Image (cartoon, grey):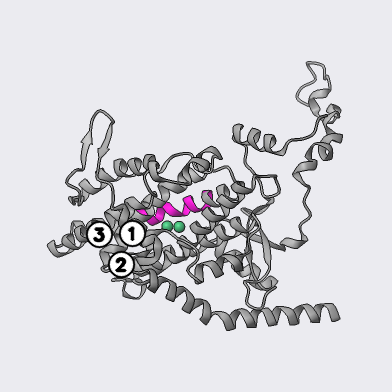
Amino acid sequence: MGVINFEDLFEAKLAKNDMIEPKDWMPENYRKHLIRQISQHAHSEIVGMLPEGNWITRAPSLRAKLVLLAKVQDEGGHGLYLYTAAESLGISRDEMLEALLTGKAKYSSIFNYPTLTWADVGAVGWLVDGAAIMNQVMLQRTSYGPYARAMVRICKEESFHQRQGYELMTHLAFGTPAQKEMAQDALNRWWYPTLMMFGPPDSESPNSENAIKWRIKRETNDQLRQRFVNQTMPQIEYLGLTVPDKNLKWNEAKKGYDFSEPDWVEFKNVIKGNGICNKERLLSRNKSHKEGEWVRAAAMAYAKKQNENYEAA
Amino acid sequence: MSKDSQGPLWEVFVQKKAGQPFVHCGNLHAFDKEMALQNARDLYTRRGEGMSLWVVPSTAIVASSPEDMGSFFEPSNDKIYRHPTFYQIPDGVGHM
Ligand SMILES: [Fe+2]
Ligand SMILES: [Fe+2]
């Protein structure tokens, strides 16, 4: 038997569509890429609780409140699944939280936009969760085992998120003229930020090439964005609403829609921290972390005491 | 553990229905076993995914390592007589 080349073994696993597991050898850049991607994904779930959390106390009915609470709770769970998936790569939870709270870490730009009306809760569930699902369905087959398994669980939970959002939009779109206008206004504001969620165009996406090579991603940003537009247009037409894009039209040759790119300068600015809500989101996270400090301290002290009693017994 | 932390890591196993095996479903942070069990319920069984839970400190798990996989499982590879198909049973004696 010759010397085992770990890199060859790793490549062979990828070629066979086998999953890479935490204890397997992996290239350092693969590990780094995953830590960045999974922790950003986790932060997005956690920060993503804030725009919708904004409406829990003002939900217009008890049913709506229960639904929104359940959805926001799910997002918290998604964050936790993802944090532990990242931890399996050798970064600690505390390091990740520190990066989020100090503003060092990135999260999805979408959550730096405000939820101004009740219709925004519908638009977020329908469009933002819809876009997230498109990405997450692909990630169920990502090459890193713990990430893929977290995605399978998350995707099961996500379908209710999108459906409740669309249901809310149907109520408004088929309601009074004022409600319909509110729905249209929400769609106008969320359309381009949602398209940005798939990331920069393939021609300018610095991390895409490795992500595809390592089978972390299986489709490119532009492919997913196109699929999202194709899937969403009939849903918009059903509601009798319009997209804020004069260039959007069906292209028979490519069996898909042509549409305008979002404003990538705005995208870069939001990522850099200059979006409408960046500061507010970071302040909220820091506030609740600080307010929970005594709870963690008490829980730790209690656990320590229990262990001492156990050892003494 | 640093002075402000999320507590140690626990592994979570769920039993879907009575009589079925407990299957690993993920992990979480908690400070003690009671909190680990409650967090596991909130995190992994919000939709009737199970009716019984185990939580185990991650440090208590002993795992084989992938590099040794070949030699570790090798002893069983040549023992084909451990499988029922190794044996010839005459036709006409019914299902066995
Ligand atoms: Fe989510
Ligand atoms: Fe969601």
Disc 2 is attached to a residue of which chain? A
Q: Is residue B61 visible?
A: yes
- As drawn, the label of residue A124 is 1
Question: Callout 2 environment at 10 Å: few (<14), some (14 to 19), or many (20+)?
Answer: many
Q: CA distance from mark 2 to mark 3?
A: 10 Å
Q: Which residues are magenta?
A: A152-163
Q: Nearer the viewer, residue A92 or A54?
A: A92
Q: CA distance from mark 2 to mark 1?
A: 8 Å
Q: Position of residue A158 (x, y in %)?
A: 43, 54
Contact between labelled residues 1 and 2, with CB atoms less than 8 Å apart: yes
Residue at the spot of label 2: A115
Magenta portion: prevailing SS class: helix
Q: Position of residue B68 (x, y in %)?
A: 80, 42
Which residue type carries mark 3?
A: Arg
Residue at the spot of label 3: A189
- Is the residue A73 above or below the residue A147 in the image? below
Q: Position of residue A270 (x, y in %)?
A: 36, 62
Dividing the image into four quarters, tell me where ligand 1 lies: bottom left
Of the numbered discs 2 and 1, the one sitting upstream in the chain is 2
- Camera-nearest label, 1 or 3: 3
Disc 3 is attached to a residue of which chain? A
In this picture, residue B67 sits left or right of residue B10: right
Label 2 C-beta lies within 8 Å of the nearest ligand 2 atom: no
Of the numbered discs 1 and 3, the one sitting upstream in the chain is 1
Residue at position x 58%, y 42% from top? A143
Residue at position x 41%, y 71% from top? A281
Q: Secondary structure at mark 3?
A: helix
